[in-house]
Amino acid sequence: MRPLDEAETTQVFEKLFKFTSNNLKNIVESPSHEGLDKNPGRYCFRLHKNRVYYVSESLVKRATNIKRENLVALGTNIGKFTKSGKFHLTIQALNLLAANAKHKVWLKPTSEMSFLYGNDVVKGGLGRITDNINAYDGVVVFSMSDVPLGFGIAAKSTQDCRKMDPNGLVVIRQADTGEYLRNQEDL
Amino acid sequence: MAEQQEGYQIDLGNLTAFDPQHQFQSIPDKREDLVKECITYATKLIQAVADSLFSLPSTEDASGPIVPLPQPTTKLPREKPLPKPAPPTKWEVFAKKKGIQNRKKDKLVFDEQTSSWKRRYGYDRVNDDNDVPIIEAKMTDEPGVDPFAKRRSEKKQRVEKQEKNRLYNLKEAAKVGALPSHVQLAATSLPITGTQAAPRKVSKDELQNVAGMAATSTASGGKFDKKLAGEKPPKHDKKYRKFLPVVEGSGMGSLEKQQSDKILNKLMAKNSHEIFNVSKAVDMYNVKSDKKRRNQQGKSSAMSSKLKVKKSPYKNAASKGSSKKGSSSKGKSGSSSKGKSK
């Protein structure tokens, strides 16, 4: 387990920024009340076996007592670095992203299942969409009851979405909660 | 061995012979003639030295007879001037005043505890301060004071005081010019020109560092050079990458926080044009300013010109600027003003 170095931190922050933009500050600097200290520590990012974890500082201190081979995970896994050094966000980051998302998309109940099976979002399944989405922005996908389902990349901006035909792709899916069942071994 | 052989004085220890009775009849004008005369006369003297050499008892050796020379008899003059008398040291002054005589001490002292003869000082000495197992508490002791630590600190103080006195004595001697010779040599190894400061003695570590730097300053980084005997392998910490500490220590300011903040700010700055919607802010600003102007015009018609407060344009602009910031922050997230300030 080690903290991220500069290059890695920039990669992680950039990916997160796509979804949260300004609220990235909240993510990085949120006080955590987990530890026994009166002063709330902060949350930090740690790299362990090519996975990036978002974990409070008090937890990190305690996790240093565990051997590296025996440590499986700590805090919240938000993503992993691939063999070629690129950073991908995984579904476990959903909670964090959903709380701080800038651009949101709500799905109709009929198309929820389709999304959870791993398909992209078509315009016909779109319930609501926030304004000011540009193309290729990070977008968090919710159900109509505000339950986060996953996240992805907006294929078109909001204006274009209105003009599109109902079968056009709106959101390219990157991760969805169905993965918890499909990719149990990977996570 | 002074032999009155023709009045020569022969000093076999220095292999010389002197003729005190020789006189030049007439000193020749040219130097070469004088030299020739001296040489011709000196050959006789050398002959005398050789004769007396061969008359000494000799021992046979593989290379020939060996003759041990006697002690020289000629007194040579002093090479260096007489040493100046050193000023009395602090202790000497005190001893003289009190009339303390210097008593000769034995190296071995009988130790009652072990009933053996122990040294007065040095390894395994009598009355060693570190050996006492128990120190009884006295009425004058404060509670919470460690007597062993106190003894150690007292000894340290005594040693420091002694060192101070030694340096003082040396300084006093140097003032008179009577430094002991080894100190004098060290002090005078100063450069003739340039700074008066003594040349800094390079420590072993420094030398090793410099040697390492020189060794690696070849085209291939010193990897394939032949190593001399006793030369240590090049020191390079295996860490080619530096990482932050995993857990932040309790020191001032955490590096990790700084690093993440720096990256965050860079990111925000790069994308601040997206964060802050300029056109929207400008529209809001214009609307607000129009409203204000309309209100002012209404008010000023009611008030007299004298009482009318002169409102500087800058004051309004500042208030409008702050209101613009407030309104734009409502439109976007809270830190949009930060993005704008970048």
Image (spheres, coloured by chain):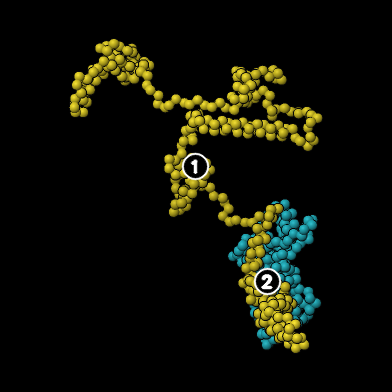
Chain colours: A cyan, B yellow
Could you say where residue B318 lies in the image, as x and y percent from the top left? 69, 76
**Residue B192 visible from this viewpoint:** yes
Which of the marked residues, 1 or 2, is nearer the chain's N terminus? Answer: 1
Label 1 chain ID: B
Q: Amino acid at mark 2?
A: Lys
Residue that appears at 58% across and 31% down? B166
Could you say where residue B5 lies in the image, as x and y percent from the top left? 27, 11
Label 2 chain ID: B
Q: Quadrant of the C terminus of chain A?
A: bottom right
For residue A160, what is the image quadrant?
bottom right
Could you say where residue B296 lies in the image, as x and y percent from the top left? 74, 85
For residue B260, what is the image quadrant?
bottom right
Return the residue at label 2: B338
Q: Tell me the crowding category of disc 1: few under 14, some 14 to 19, or many 20 or more residues within 10 angstroms, Cα based.
A: few
Residue that appears at 63% across and 73% down? B271
Residue under disc 1 on the same chain as residue under disc 2? yes
Residue that appears at 49% across and 49% down? B213
Return the residue at label 1: B197
B137 sits left or right of B3 in the view: right
Residue that appears at 40% across and 24% down? B78
Inter-mark Cα distance, 1 to 2: 56 Å
For residue A133, what is the image quadrant?
bottom right
Q: Is residue B18 positioned above or below B332 on the image?
A: above
Along the line of sight, the residue nearer the viewer: A29 or B319: B319
